[in-house]
Image (cartoon, rainbow, N blue to C red):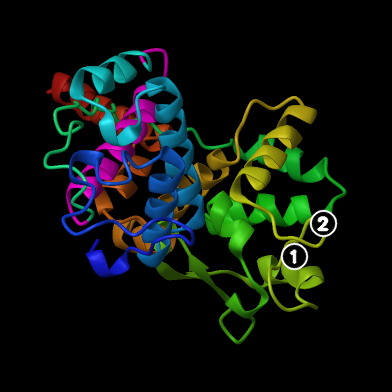
Amino acid sequence: MSAELVYLPQNLPVQPAGGFHGGQGSYGPMPNEAIIQIYVQSMRAARLSENHITHVRQNLCRLADHLSPTLLVEARYPQLLAWQVSMSHLAAGTAAVCISNVRVFYRWLVRPMRILDVSPAEELIVPKVPARRPRPVPENHLQIAVACTLDPMMRAWLYLGAYAGLRCCEIAELQRGWVIDGEVPRLQVIGKGSKERVVYIGPQILSILEPFMERTGHLFLRANGRPFRAQNVSNRIGDHFKSVGLPYTAHQLRHRYGTRALALTKNIRVVQEQMGHSSPATTQVYAMVNEEETVDLAKALDAEVRDTRRT
């Protein structure tokens, strides 16, 4: 992230020559609200997704609350370590994201902002996150969830997650112009890190989206006419599952897509592209859950053992 990508908010004093060295200057320490606002603007200038920016901002605000009355720019390693210890009740994945966000933030304070000489967060250890087995929604339970909704929007969301592999943020951001209803229907999707990809769909999915394709702009709108946020989509899908007695989350629809797509194609690269994974290693985990094939393999090998014992 270069210095050219940083924009100062209005009404903020321009830093004197040499900067707020060590968070100090003729104006004193930079307040938390100002530094977070500048960081948010720099992330937007770098074209990071609004969903990511929202989560980073929330994590920095929580850190600021923990450090109070010490300002973010005045924090030292022991204070940040105490903050990390205070998150011991969180899942390893959640804590890892929080710590990574804070480490990147303090690197930004060192360069390009040059507010600090060194980052006090550099020695924080990001916990290793154990590889999780995907937990796809079972087919019979997915059919129950679909059958138990009369809401066309909820039905569309369920299908987009389970049969197109879209994330909640991608469903929320989907726009009419990104639905290509030509000979080969497809969706132009903006995924994590604002990365664009094309997701191919069939005529059935296209027909499910047709009621929402009569307007321009965002495909799915709230009652007040505003687009949904990723958290809105996630919460609503989760609430729907709960309402029909099913213990699943919205993201498990995507797990279902990844597992099924890999079972059908046997091609990790194809599934990687369709799901928008940056690494095939992420896609590979979806090959770990096909227990039927594993059982078939065990039976086949057992038959070979039986044959050798007969000789």
Residue 29 coordinates in the image, percent (x, y) = 31, 38
Which element type, helix, strand or loop, lies under badge 1? helix
Q: Residue at the location (35% across, 42% down)?
A: 30
Q: Is residue 265 visible?
A: no
The chief SS type of the magenta part is helix
Q: What's the magenta region?
A: 88-112
Residue 283 coordinates in the image, percent (x, y) = 33, 49
Q: Residue at the location (75% across, 60% down)?
A: 226
Relative height, residue 66 to residue 99 (above, below): above
Relative height, residue 187 to residue 97 (above, below): below
Compare residues 142 and 13 and report the one nearer the observer: 13
Mark 1 or mark 2, which has the lower sequence index?
2
Residue extending farthest to the bottom is 183
Residue occupied by mark 2: 152
Amino acid identity at mark 1: Ile
Horizontal side of 293 relative to 138 (left or right) equals: left
Horizontal side of 156 relative to 52 (left or right) equals: right
Residue 70 coordinates in the image, percent (x, y) = 35, 24
Q: Judge whether residue 307 is colored magenta.
A: no
Residue occupied by mark 1: 208
Amino acid identity at mark 2: Pro
Q: Residue at the location (72% across, 41% down)?
A: 236
Marks 1 and 2 in Cβ contact (< 8 Å) = yes
Residue 22 coordinates in the image, percent (x, y) = 19, 39
Compare residues 298 and 30 and report the one nearer the observer: 30
Instruction: Give the quarter of the image for residue 48.
Output: bottom left
Q: Quarter of the image for the C terminus: give it.
A: top left
**Structural crowding at the residue carrying mark 2, measured as other residues with C-alpha within 10 Å and reported as few (<14), some (14–19) or many (≥20):** some
Horizontal side of 46 relative to 203 (left or right) equals: left
Q: Judge whether residue 102 is colored magenta.
A: yes
Compare residues 148 and 124 and report the one nearer the observer: 124
